Image (cartoon, rainbow, N blue to C red):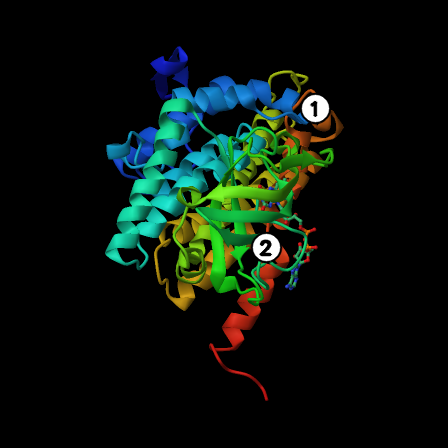
Amino acid sequence: MTAHVSIPELGLDSVALDPPLFDPAAFLLSEEEAALAGKARAMGRAIFAARAAAYDRDATFPTENYRDLHKAGFLGICIPKREGGLGADYRAYSICAAEIGRYCGATALTWNMHVCSTLWSGPLVDDLEMEPAVRAEHERGRAIHYRRIVEEGAIYAQPFSEGGAAAAGGAAFETRAEPVEGGWRVNGKKIFASLAGYADYYGVLATEQAGGEAPSRRNTLYLAIPSRAEGVSVVGDWDPLGMRGTVSRTLLFRDVFVAEDHALMPRGVYFQAATRWPHMFLTLSPTYMGLAQAAYDFTVKYLRGEEPGTPPVKRRMYPTKQIAVAEMRVKLEQAKALWFQAVSEARPNPSKEQVLRAYAAQFSTMETANDLARLAIRSCGGQSMLKALPLERIYRDSRCGSLMLPWTAELCLDRIGREALYEPGESDE
Ligand SMILES: Cc1cc2nc3c(=O)[nH]c(=O)nc-3n(C[C@H](O)[C@H](O)[C@H](O)COP(=O)(O)OP(=O)(O)OC[C@H]3O[C@@H](n4cnc5c(N)ncnc54)[C@H](O)[C@@H]3O)c2cc1C
């Protein structure tokens, strides 16, 4: 029986849902997780799916989707309930992002950047060590951001990448924050800054560096820089292969003054988070889990002759099609099982096995999404990859997953191999 969900805030009455990515009974989801995931799926199917083609074609930001996410409370999904949010934890959020990714990859991926500003400054930081006074000050500061998001629909981006070794974790960020009276003066450049020109705040990672001090990763600051601050500019164009609606243009910061209360984490805490809470870097994967499911769902519908807008010719009687679908299903189940396990294990100080599993989950999700899209096109045929249908967009969007630093597909393999063969401190010298 098809389940239905209503979202009165969006005027949605009894939306017929697609089957869940993670069946609540099979995956033992909490009632809250199942309800949030159902709402995400309803928004995706009833609203975002129909808008996705235009954002992709024009490489424009999904502004309308963000208005709807705000109305439904989803901009504050990880903000604690006592502060007006929906209070979702890491796993509940990840499942919702995967559900949205099924219908619009660019919305899910940019939403991830926004949500992480609250997830990292909230539930994740709550697990880390801080002096009580520092924690109290942090809670006071983040409440200002949370209020803006919940009440005004403020949007936060997460531009870290600079084109050098920093985003992969290999060096200090070249964007520098020089301490000055009441805050910092920030100078630097961020490339591939999703939501550039659309976010209200840019959650920037910068190296705090006074005078002749040597840059150190330990001194990484996480600052919310207002997009309208003097010295902030968006440059370059954005005309990529996939994830076109992310509008990931280049950001420049020239002598931008950032006040002390704009820090999204206290001093030293980002470094602590990156080393003690590594699953923080797995949050780019849910979008691609959703795309993997979308490629599979499309194929089944198409071969059954049920995909709207396609010729009503059934192709399911050919053994090659059945084998292709079987192969896709096996790969999808493998990726889903591993991803769900890794997402369920997100916590501070994970074991070595859990960290290796998280890398494996990231690798497998990113690569499987594109592999399923490839198999979908091969099996469904030429008419399936016309731009009127979502499959070719899924194919292009899914190709981007393996490129997301710091856990690109290559770097995941690199880390798994090294960390499996060497214990910390070991060498062959
Ligand atoms: C659609 C999209 C949206 C994005 N949005 C954001 C965003 O909002 N914020 C943000 O900060 N970034 C974002 N990124 C950027 C992304 O994380 C990368 O920084 C970006 O793709 C540029 O990286 P590159 O492949 O040119 O990097 P390079 O550093 O040139 O790396 C090239 C390849 O070399 C490998 N490599 C890199 N370093 C090492 C190493 N030390 N050892 C071995 N191999 C290595 C990696 O596999 C990488 O794929 C986005 C990217 C895409 C595609």
Secondary structure of the residue carrying tag 2 is: loop
Which residue is at a point 37% across and 53% down the rendered structure image?
346
Left or right for 252, reference 152: right
Which residue is at a point 26% across and 53% down the rendered structure image?
133
Which residue is at a point 59% across and 58% down the rendered structure image?
168
Left or right for 216, reference 130: right
Please state the horizontal and vertical placement of residue 46, each as a whole percent of the image.
48, 17
Please state the horizontal and vertical placement of residue 309, each as a whole percent of the image.
65, 16
Amino acid tagged 2? Ala
Please state the horizontal and vertical placement of residue 55, each as a whole percent of the image.
63, 23
Camera-side residue of 185 and 227: 185
Task: Looking at the image, tell me whether mark 2 or mark 1 is earlier in sequence order.
Answer: 1
Camera-side residue of 399 and 138: 138
How many marks the image carries: the answer is 2
Q: How many angstroms separate mark 2 from mark 1 (CA)?
A: 29 Å
| For the residues bearing labels 2 and 1, Cβ distance under 8 angstroms | no
Asked whether the viewer can see residue 88, the reply is: no
Camera-side residue of 380 and 150: 150
Reading the image, the residue beneath label 1 is: 57
